[in-house]
Image (cartoon, rainbow, N blue to C red):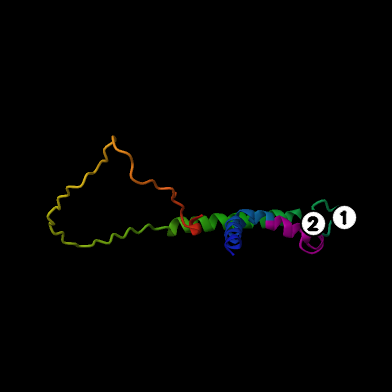
Amino acid sequence: MKRFFVIFLSFMLLVPSFGSFFVYTSFKLNQEEISKTICVQRKMVFNSCNGRCELQKSLKKYSDNEKRMQNNLKEKAEVVYIQNTIVTSYKFVTSIESRAKIFASFDTKPISVSNSTFRPPSYFI
């Protein structure tokens, strides 16, 4: 399930970059019909266009739409900084003196040895 979710999100991130590819593919799939019905030069005897004029129009329309969307995003992008202030009162706590040895002396033998190693939980991997 996790792998499917990762693949789906990756695909969704890549879809906008293939927009012109989709326009070209749809043109190639319908090129015969476009050249017979929509093309400006369809009534000419020696038509060398084969609907490419419509492909150029579609690609230009797509790129203009992309530029317009980017401009809209730039205009609407507003950064709002919110700072939550938490008022806390600090109390002075008297320090506790410890008489335990912090460092072990190096002239005695170690008392115990740890054979276990730290292993992070498997859901982080």
Asked which secondary structure carries label 2, the reply is loop
Residue shown at the point (46%, 52%) measured from the top left: 119
Q: Is residue 8 above or below residue 101?
A: below
Q: Which residues are magenta?
A: 22-40
Residue shown at the point (61%, 62%) measured from the top left: 4
Asked which secondary structure carries label 1, the reply is loop
Question: In the figure, is residue 42 to the left or right of 11?
Answer: right
Q: Which residue is mark 2?
A: 41
Which amino acid, by three-letter code, is at mark 1? Answer: Val
Per the image, is 31 magenta?
yes
Find residue 44 and report its horizontal and vertical position in percent. 84, 56
Find residue 105 and report its horizontal and vertical position in percent. 26, 38
In the foreground, 41 or 9: 9
CA gap, disc 1 to disc 2? 9 Å
Per the image, is 8 magenta?
no
Q: Is residue 57 above or below residue 114?
A: below
Find residue 52 and report its horizontal and vertical position in percent. 75, 53
Which amino acid, by three-letter code, is at mark 2? Answer: Gln
**Of helix, strand and loop, which mostly describes the magenta segment?**
helix
In the foreground, 110 or 63: 110
Q: Which residue is mark 1?
A: 45
Q: Residue furthest right?
A: 45
Q: Quadrant of residue 108?
A: top left
Find residue 51 and report its horizontal and vertical position in percent. 77, 56
Q: Quadrant of the N terminus?
A: bottom right
Mark 2 burial class by Cα count in 10 Å: few <14, some 14-19, many 20+: some
Question: In the figure, is residue 72 to the left or right of 65?
Answer: left
Q: Which mark is residue 27?
A: none
